Image (tube, coloured by chain):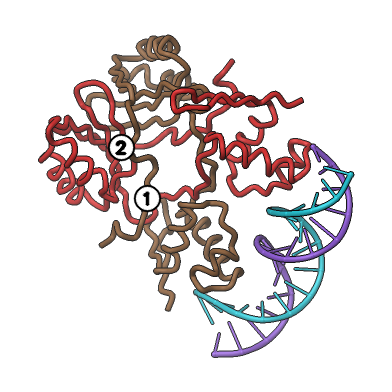
Chain colours: A brown, B red, C purple, D cyan
Amino acid sequence: MRKSRCSARSPYDFQVELDAVDWKILDLLQQDGRMSYTALGRVVSLSAPAVTERVRRLEALGVITGFVAVVSPARLGLPIESIVRVRVRSLDTPRFRSHVLALPQIRDADHVTGDDCWLLRVVCRSMVELEELVEVMQRYGDTTTSLVFSSHVRNRPVEAALFD
Amino acid sequence: MRKSRCSARSPYDFQVELDAVDWKILDLLQQDGRMSYTALGRVVSLSAPAVTERVRRLEALGVITGFVAVVSPARLGLPIESIVRVRVRSLDTPRFRSHVLALPQIRDADHVTGDDCWLLRVVCRSMVELEELVEVMQRYGDTTTSLVFSSHVRNRPVEAALFD
DNA sequence: GTTGAAAGCAGGAGGGT
DNA sequence: ACCCTCCTGCTTTCAAC
């Protein structure tokens, strides 16, 4: 019944095959990361040790990379969220990575193709704080800043439907 | 010892004050969302029921919005990650929201200020699939697509240091 | 905030298919 | 390879303080 097979033998051979039970477990844990193995087992009709072993394997394979509490920056006094695109000059990239990417206000930083080579998601307390942050970033290249009105999707679970 | 005060009485009165113990708990749970209340209690020198009550309060206040397993799309066969900026024509916005934002490939969708009014993080299996997705989005407005080389920061924990 | 008892859960051993 | 049951020790939860 189980045909899960791992082909992740090197960094360039990543992909993992999951069966329906693995997908259901992933689905549940992406909605409630604290669900007990016993409760998971009740849903997928498996014993707790069997579920535990599957979750351990999903972690070992790098499918599950961790379990985290999701926190609202706005509720903690960081109501300003923005996306800053930075066109970092190549000579400045090492300093940009060590000085800018380490700032606690940066929640996501992606190196991307295209003219704006870095894309940063920044949270801060005020527009004044954002202004200061953007001024720092401008030491490394040109910036384009957009304020986030609202986030309609955040970290949507990865689901089996993606493979239909 | 505890001076946590909540001022979140309306949607426009969001902010919550946390004490050092709350911050430590948040810190630990953002690193390991499955940590037991007993283990949290050992770190912060509190009994398990006291920790449980604090975590429940943080959830009730909207500071903690959930606990989730973090999943690697690449390991599941979605190696292409990209950021698509979409300049949606205002008349097309309702259909864009219902048709595009619901696609399972969309992991983040933010409505932002500036010319490119929507910012989408898309994962897919191949460039061909990305091409198809972008063609769908182009029915609602102009797009700019950047491929993600690498993500250097992803969902950095919100930490007390942000308030120094 | 605490303790303490009852119920439920996790994780290992051992065995079955 | 995959799963089960049993057993022991922890963890959670609720009540009482």
Residue B51 at x, y percent in the picture: 70, 41
Mark 1, residue position: B73
> Upstream in the sequence, badge 1 or badge 2?
1
Task: Please indicate whether residue B25 sits to the left or right of residue A45 in the image.
Answer: right
Most foreground residue, A100 or B69: B69
Q: Residue at x 44, y 14 (%)?
A: A126
Q: CA distance from mark 1 to mark 2?
A: 17 Å
Left or right relative to B117: residue D9: right
Q: Position of residue A61 (x, y in %)?
A: 48, 57
Relative to residue A88, is residue B66 depicted above or below? below
Decide: few, some or many residues near mark 1? Use Cα within 10 Å; few <14, some 14-19, many ≥20: many
Q: Quadrant of residue A39?
A: bottom right
Tell me what residue is drawn at x 44 percent, y 33 percent.
B153
Q: Amino acid at mark 2?
A: Ala
Instruction: Work out whether A50 lies above or below B68.
Output: below
Closer mark to the observer between disc 1 and disc 2: 2
Q: What amino acid is found at the position of numbered circle 1 in the picture? A: Pro
| Circle 2 residue | B109
Q: Chain of mark 1?
A: B
Viewer-closest of A39 and A1:
A39
Image point (68%, 44%), residue name: B52
Q: Nearer the viewer, residue D2 or B32?
A: B32
SS at mark 1 in the image? loop
Quadrant containing the C terminus of chain A in the rendered view? bottom left
Residue at image location 45% in from the left, 29% down from the top: A107
Q: Are marks 1 and 2 in contact (CB under 8 Å)?
A: no
